[in-house]
Amino acid sequence: MRAIAALAADTLRRSLTASAVLVLAYSLSPTAVTQLHENPVASGSVRGIYRFSSTAWSTIAGLGYNWVTDGGTNTNYYQGQRSAGLTGMVWLAAYDNSSCKQTMSDAQITQVVQTNVSGGNAGAVYQVGDEPTANGCAAGATYVHMTSVIHAADHAARTWVADDQFNDPSTSSWPAGLPMKPAGLPMKGSVDILALDIYPCQAGPCQLNMIDLAIQRIHSVGLTNWEFILQDFGPCQSWRAPNATEMLQQFQHWQGAGAIGYWVYTYDSDGSCPGNVAGSSVLKQINGLAVNPGSAPPPPSPASPPPAGTPSTAPSGTPAAQTPAPKSSPRATSSSKPSGKASPGSSHPAAGASSGDPPANPLKPTLAAIESSSLPLAVVGIGALLAVIGIALGYMRRRTK
C-alpha cells in the first residue's frame, strides 16, 4: 500500500506540473491575446479612420480606433476587422455629386443591405456616396429616399455621409458648393448620421476658426447625431500637411461640441494625397481624449426605425468603404474618390453611445474570452480529476497508517 501511495503522489505531482504548463502556455498564446484584446478607446465614442490600401487592422486598433472604412460582409475585410476589434462602415456608391443623380437602383441598394443582414452584419452603418452638395446638388430629397430604402431592408441600419458645406476658408460662402446658399444645414434630416469635414490647413496657419464657426451653425439648427472629420493628409492640391500640434488643435476645437464621434482622413495615401502625415503618436494621443469632456452631448434618438421616408436619428451600423479624396477647388472642398477606395463610414450604436454614457464593463473582454474558449473547461476538468486523485491519495494514506 505504501508503494501505491507513493505512485499516486508522484502521479499527482506530474499532473499538477502538466496543468500549470498548460495554463501558462495558453496565457501566452496568440489566441489568448486576441480573445482578451480590448481596444484602448475611451468609452462610448466613435473613433474612425479612413484607409485605402492598408489592411493593418491590429495596428490601427492599437492606435485607439474602433471604426474603419471598407467594412461589411460584402467585402473581404469584414473578418479581419472584427478580429482586431474594429467595426467597418459599408460603402454604397449610390450617388454622383457631379450628375446629382442616384447611381444605384433601389434593388441594388437593397441587395447590399440584405447581404450584410444574412451575413450577420445587421444594423450596419452605410456610407452613401460622398459630399453630395460639393458641386451644387440639391441632394437632400434623394438622400431621404435612399435612407428609407436602407431602413426598409434593415430597420436597425443607419445611413452616413460626409458633408463639406463648411470646408471653405471663405466662410461667407457657406454652405460651400451650394450657389443658392440656403440657411442652416441643407443635408440635415437626410441621413441618420451627418459627418462634417473641415480641412483647415492650407497655405499659412491652419484656419481653425472654420471649426468654431461651424459649431455655431450646428448648434443653431439643433443638429444631433453628427460627427466631424480631421485633416491628416497633405501636401496635395491646395492643402499642406498639418503637423502633430495642428492635428491636436483641430481636435481640441471640436472637443466638447456634442459630436458623437469623429474620423481622421487618412491613414494611408488615397492615391494623390499622402496620409498619416502628423505621426501615429498624436493619433494615439487624440484617441485617448474624451470627445465631450465633463458633459454629455445630446442623447441619441431611440433605436426604433423611423417612419418610411424619414431618416432615423439614431446612429448604428457598418457601411462598406470607398474613400473620397479631397477635391481640387479654390474653396478647398473635397470630392469623392474613384470607386474601390476605402471610404469612411461610421456606425454608432455598435461602437457605443456618446462619451457621456456609462463606462463599459472592464471585465467584458475577459468574460467573452472565457465563454468563447473551450480550454478553460478542459482546465476545470483537469482540476476536478486532480481533486479526486487527491482525495483517493489521502484515503490510501490513512489506510496504510
Image (cartoon, rainbow, N blue to C red):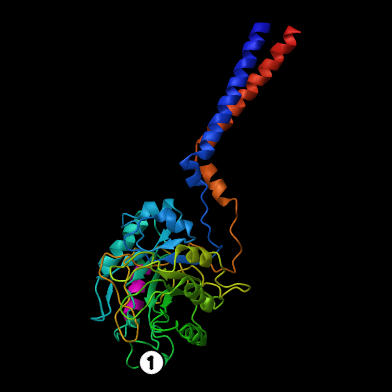
The quadrant of the rendering that contains the N terminus is top right
For label 1, count other residues whose C-alpha is less than 10 Å away and answer few (under 14), some (14-19) or many (20+).
Answer: some
Residue flagged by tag 1: what amino acid is it? Ser
Q: Is residue 362 magenta?
A: no
Q: Is residue 383 left or right of residue 375?
A: right
| Of residues 266 and 16, the one drawn nearer to the viewer in this rendering | 266
Range of magenta residues? 142-151
- Residue 381 makes an appearance in the image: no
- Considering the numbered disc 1 on the image, is that residue within a helix, a strand or a loop? helix
Residue under numbered circle 1 = 173
Q: Residue 315 appears at what percent x and percent y? A: 46, 69
Q: Is residue 151 left or right of residue 108?
A: right
Q: Residue furthest right?
A: 401
The quadrant of the rendering that contains the C terminus is top right
Residue at 58% across, 22% down:
15
Q: Quadrant of residue 124?
A: bottom left
Q: Is residue 42 left or right of residue 3?
A: left
Q: Residue 378 appears at what percent x and percent y? A: 53, 31
Residue at 60% across, 50% down:
363
